[in-house]
Image (cartoon, grey):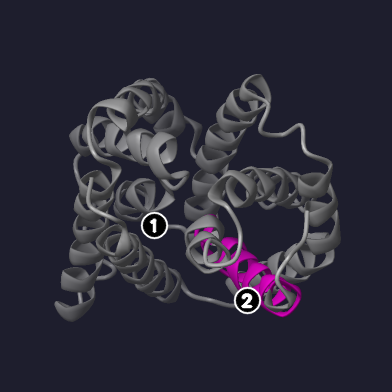
Amino acid sequence: MEFSPWVYLVAPLVVFAGYVAFGISGFGATIIIVPVLAQFLSLKFVVPMLVLLDLTAIGMMRANKATQARDTSEIRWMLPFMLTGMALGAYLLKAVPERWLMLALGVFVAGYALITLLRHQVGGGTIARAWGPPLALLGGMGSALFGTGGPVYAIYVTRRLHDPGVMRATMSSIIAISVVVRIVAFALTGLLLNMALGAAALALFVFMAGGLLLGLRLHSRMKAQDVRRVVHVLLVVSGSSLALRAMMMSAP
């Protein structure tokens, strides 16, 4: 496979930046990296490659005990709805035009985060557990449709958990579950049976690792309020990028 010369410059930089965000917040790599690399590479190449990098990043976080303090009760509460959402997302991908689904998700995520930031309520209060099922369902649908349910999961996790370490650890564990499900799906469909894809992931490993380690270091020096603010800025960026990408898609 031949790559544009720009890929060799852009890919390392955007992968590094994406995994700095992942190290700080426990999510955000895919939604930062995909919109940029999709300008140069096929989504069928980019998304499976990032799944491999995500899996490696999660393994590194576990080795660094970065996920030791995750809240398993919240994960168990969300899991069945996440899986249901993934199944529903797979159905909707065939039944509903992708651009309208992507636009709706992007506007929802960016709008929520922007309103929260403007009202200076990033710390906020604790939302009811009843918000878990609908947000987990929506996040699962986002994972299946666009490979990015993290922003929706973060809306729930950041308003349920108050310790930044537990918050990030719980998010990274939720992303890990999503990654495993997607790896199985990509393996079954043959998308991972691509030598160029594996070679690209290997070449970008050092940039992923460097960004992740920097993000972990930055996270350890931040207060809970600062971590939430970073997460909400990521939500605005990720939601806006989804909405913009949807508007740029050709009408069905």
Q: In the picture provided, is 138 more to the left or to the right than 169?
A: left
Q: Is residue 124 visible?
A: no
Query: Is 23 or 169 nearer to us in this picture?
Result: 23
Gap in angstroms between the C-alphas marked 1 and 2: 18 Å
Quadrant position of residue 128: top left
- Prevailing secondary structure class for the magenta stretch in the rendered image: helix
Give the residue number, with chain letter if any, for mark 1: 162
Residue 22: give x, y in percent of width and height.
58, 61
Q: In the picture provided, is 197 more to the left or to the right than 50?
A: right
Look at 64% across and 48% down and name the residue there.
45
Residue 181: give x, y in percent of width and height.
56, 27
The disc at residue 170 is none
Residue 236: give x, y in percent of width and height.
31, 70
Q: Is residue 145 visible?
A: yes
Q: In the picture provided, is 115 more to the left or to the right than 81?
A: left
Closer to the eye: label 1 or 2: 2
Quadrant position of residue 91: top left
Look at 66% across and 48% down and name the residue there.
54
**Mark 1 or mark 2: whose residue is earlier in sequence:** 1
Q: Residues within 10 Å of mark 1 (few under 14, many from 20)?
A: some
Look at 81% across and 48% down and name the residue there.
196
Query: Is 241 or 212 nearer to us in this picture?
Result: 241
Amino acid type, callout 1: His
Give the residue number, with chain letter if any, for mark 2: 218
Amino acid type, callout 2: Leu
Label 2 element class: helix
The range drawn in magenta is 7-28
